[in-house]
Image (cartoon, grey):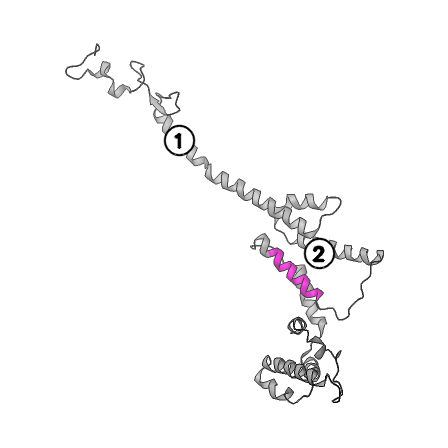
Amino acid sequence: MRMSLDAKNKLSFVDGSLPRPDIADNLFKIWSRCNSMVKAWLLNVVNKEIYDSILYYEDAVEMWNDLYLRFRVSNLPWKYQLKQSIMTSKQENLDLSTYYTKKKTLWEQLANTRTTTVKRCNCDHVKELVEEAKTSRIIQFLMGLNESFANIRGQILNMKPRPGLTEIYNMLDQDESQRSVGHSLKSIANPSAFQIQSSNLAEQPHTLLAQTGYPKPKCSHCHKMGHIADKCYKLHGYPPGSGPSK
């Protein structure tokens, strides 16, 4: 809801930064029209059970504060659940992309539970804290990977300087793709197929390969190419009207 109000430049009507002007003020009518519009948006997104309880507020900020005080929850149990999920989540039967997305979503949800806004600071101490937080995320991500990534994981841990989380994901994705290609090639080159081929050749001991690479039989009786002993004319006789000269 805050995102929607901010996109319409109306967030100031609910956070109190744009208070109600005096009726005699020239901007009062403009403010009143925008205030009513924000109130209508709020009323349209609440349940019917809540609608009547906030209908008669004059200002949108009053509606907002009522809803906030009524439905706000403590961040501590939510933080506990998120941190527990982050530490216990494993890849298991998930593909790498799904696991990475799940982990990243949990990190963003945990970051969104902060209750105070810290002013931007570029001092060395803050930079160290940021690097420590990034390193912690990388360790959590690598810990949950399946053992099939054990080799590449070891290489990543020994890298200096340490790569970023996105770079690590790309390295893991590339490693997974290479292993998938290797597995596919092994499946195509099935050893059983070679065994069957070798068995067929063993049953035809007199079969040789011609220069073209295709099998060509050789007779064990006359030692000529193109036929086998079962069909050798010199052994079984020539057909009528033919002979050795023909």
In the image, residue 111 lies in the stretch drawn in magenta = yes
Task: Report the residue marked by disc 1.
Answer: 197
- The overriding secondary structure of the stretch rendered in magenta is helix
In-front residue for pair 93/111: 111
The residue tagged with tag 1: helix, strand or loop? helix
Of residues 101 and 81, the one drawn nearer to the viewer in this rendering: 101
- Residue 153 as seen in the image, left or right of residue 125: left
| Residue located farthest toward the front when viewing the structure as drawn | 26
Above or below for 145 versus 224: below
User: Going 22% across and 16% down the picture, which residue do you hit?
Assistant: 233
Residue at left offset 71%, top offset 75%: 74
Q: Position of residue 50 (x, y in %)?
A: 61, 85
Which quadrant of the figure has residue 178?
top right
- The magenta-colored residue range is 99-112
Characterize the local packing of mark 1: few (<14), some (14-19) or many (20 or more) Cα atoms within 10 angstroms.
few
11 up-or-down from 198: above or below: below
User: What is the distance, in whole Å, between disc 2 and disc 1 at their CAs?
Assistant: 53 Å
Foreground disc of the pair 2, 1: 2
- Percent from the top left, x then y, of residue 51? 60, 86
Residue under circle 2?
A: 137
Where residue 96 sits: x, y (%)? 59, 52
Instruction: Identify which residue, 4 or 220, lies in the foreground.
Output: 4
Q: Amino acid at mark 2?
A: Arg
* Percent coordinates x, y for residue 71 in the rendering: 67, 79
Is residue 123 shown above or below 17? Answer: above
Does label 2 or label 1 sit earlier along the sequence?
A: 2
* Amino acid at the residue labelled 1: Gln
* Quarter containing the N terminus: bottom right
Q: Residue furthest left?
A: 240
- Give the position of the C terminus as an image quadrant: top left
> Is there a contact, CB below 8 Å, between mark 2 and mark 1?
no
